[in-house]
Image: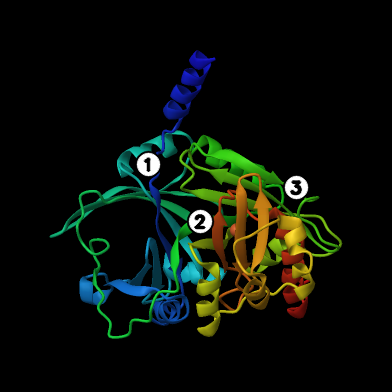
Amino acid sequence: MSTQTATLSTNALAQDFLPLQGTDYVEFYVGNAKQAAHFYKTAFGFQSLAYAGPETGVKDRASYAVRQNKLTFVFTTPLRSGNEIADHIYKHGDGVKMLALRVDDARDAWHQTTSRGGTSYLEPTVLTDAEGEVIISGIHTYGDTVHLFIERKNYNGVFMPGYRKWDSHYNPPSTGLLYVDHCVGNVGWNQMNKWVNFYEEVMGFRNILSFDDKDISTEYSALMSKVMSNGNGFVKFPINEPAEGKKKSQVEEYLEFYDGEGCQHVALATNDIVATVTELQERGVEFLKVPTTYYDDLLDRVGHIDEDLAPLRELGILVDRDDEGYLLQIFTKPVEDRPTLFFEIIQRKGAKSFGKGNFKALFEAIEREQSARGNL
Ligand code: FE2
């Protein structure tokens, strides 16, 4: 028995050929990075961190990095038309381009993944300034989305070479958002297993949870989902695929308006979801609302929770329980005019799952919005 356990853990170690320390940053390609950064500071409570652009020697784009606890977002806009960034925005609208992952060795991460079939986006590249060096590399994932590998152990600067510190007199306080809990990708019909295989074979992830169309269907529309996790669980990428229903799946609506596969939502963790969501709502962030009847039998469904029910009902925060504990979650409406990217706010109290018990109420709320857009 002990021999077998030892063998298993040795294998598990041997198989983690891509050790990840977590999400380094999320980079969005947007039509107006200056205004996007202002929105995420004002509405979500990020602080100014760093800026890159013509004034720092970067001629083709402007990038604003903002930070809140362990969360770093970068907003990048092109300064001219006819380039990869401009084409990305023309096709997809504002959206997630880079899911950048922190590694100890960006050269090895690139060699490990490309030798297993990953398509290179960026060969290992050393960026240097007076503060040291950052090594970055990258591979393509679904759609036009990219995973960058960021090695910054020999860097002391504020963000990356090419950036300068961004000091601002405008510093709205934090809303208590802490780190990226997970990032969900929407992929096309019959593509989910292709991307599950990609995360397993190219990146060494495991499929830790699966939902079929019976778990995630309403009267009208359906989807399927598989959750992929890296070895230490710091990085989790659920993959959604549309499924046949009476009407158009919310994943199909996304694929149509994003014009392809891409990141559907980024889940942001908090230790106090009532305080965080109260603050976000006051600052104008719009959330999906479930009917108040959701709360009538909530405690019968999930058992005892530490929180008072009244603020959860008032704010529209959802609760679900699994074998290990419970979680609280809420979803924003899309944060741009295309019905594409949105955010989830999540507080985990032991639960490691994703709110399966809320899918039906949640998707009915999404469908009410979808119907209001004429896309159901
Ligand atoms: Fe989620």
Tag 1: amino acid: Trp
| Residue at mark 2 | 181
State whether residue 188 appears in this view.
Answer: no
**Which x, y percent locates residue 74?**
39, 67
Residue at (44, 78) in percent of width and height: 36
Whether 110 is drawn above or below 56: the answer is above
State yes or no: Cβ of the residue under disc 2 lies below 8 Å from any atom of ligand 1: yes
Check disc 2 and report its element: helix, strand or loop.
Answer: strand
Report the front residue among 192 and 144.
192
Disc nearest the viewer among 3 and 1: 3
Kind of residue at disc 2: Asp
Cα separation between marks 2 and 1: 24 Å
Q: Residues within 10 Å of mark 1 (few under 14, many from 20)?
A: many
The residue that label 3 is drawn on is 212
Q: CA distance from mark 3 to mark 2?
A: 22 Å
Q: Does 37 sit left or right of 344 as displayed?
A: left
Q: Do callouts 2 and 1 mark residues in contact (Cβ within 8 Å)?
A: no
Sequence-wise, which precedes: disc 2 or disc 1? 1
In the picture, the disc for residue 110 is 1
Color scheme of the displayed model:
rainbow
Q: Position of residue 307 (x, y in %)?
A: 60, 66
The foreground one among 274 and 78 is 274
Earlier in the chain: of badge 3 and badge 1, it is 1
Q: Is residue 92 above or below residue 187?
A: below
Amino acid type of the residue tagged 3 in the rendering: Asp
